[in-house]
Image (cartoon, rainbow, N blue to C red):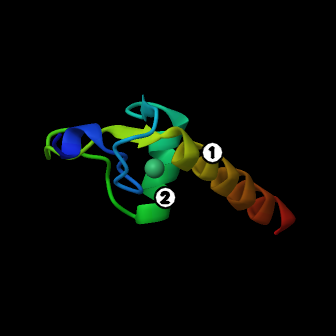
Amino acid sequence: MGMAFTCRVCLCGRRRLHAIRDTLFQEIWEKLTSVKFNTNDGKSLLVCYICCAQLRKSHELMKRASEAE
Ligand SMILES: [Zn+2]
């Protein structure tokens, strides 16, 4: 099993994985990592359901913090 079938965030390969390309999860991931999501670098385009939930929570936190300003 190569990197293409592991979670991009936690590198786990045993959980249910979701393709995040062109989704809100891609945008959140890019904000968190300050890295552009490159689909041609051979790295995984998948994120496990647990990290997806954490990305969603991070998004909510970022939104709440911005709104409070
Ligand atoms: Zn994960």
As drawn, is 18 to the left or to the right of 53? left
Above or below for 42 versus 54: above
Q: Amino acid at mark 2?
A: Lys
Q: Nearer the viewer, mark 2 or mark 1?
A: 1
Q: Amino acid at mark 1?
A: Ala
CB at disc 2 and ligand 1 closer than 8 Å: no
Disc 2 target residue: 31
Q: Residue at x 14, y 40 (%)?
A: 40
Above or below for 11 versus 16: below
Disc 1 target residue: 53
* Residue 59 spot, x, y in % from top left: 65, 52
Q: Residue at x 57, y 46 (%)?
A: 50
* Structural crowding at the residue carrying mark 2, measured as other residues with C-alpha within 10 Å and reported as few (<14), some (14–19) or many (≥20): some
Q: Earlier in the sequence, mark 2 or mark 1?
A: 2
As drawn, is 69 to the left or to the right of 13? right
Going by the picture, which residue comes out furthest to the right? 68
Quadrant showing the N terminus: top left
* Residue 13 spot, x, y in % from top left: 34, 43
Helix, strand or loop at mark 1: helix
Q: Nearer the viewer, residue 3 or 62?
A: 3
* Mark 2 to mark 1 CA distance (whole Å): 16 Å
Helix, strand or loop at mark 2: helix
* Residue 35 spot, x, y in % from top left: 33, 60
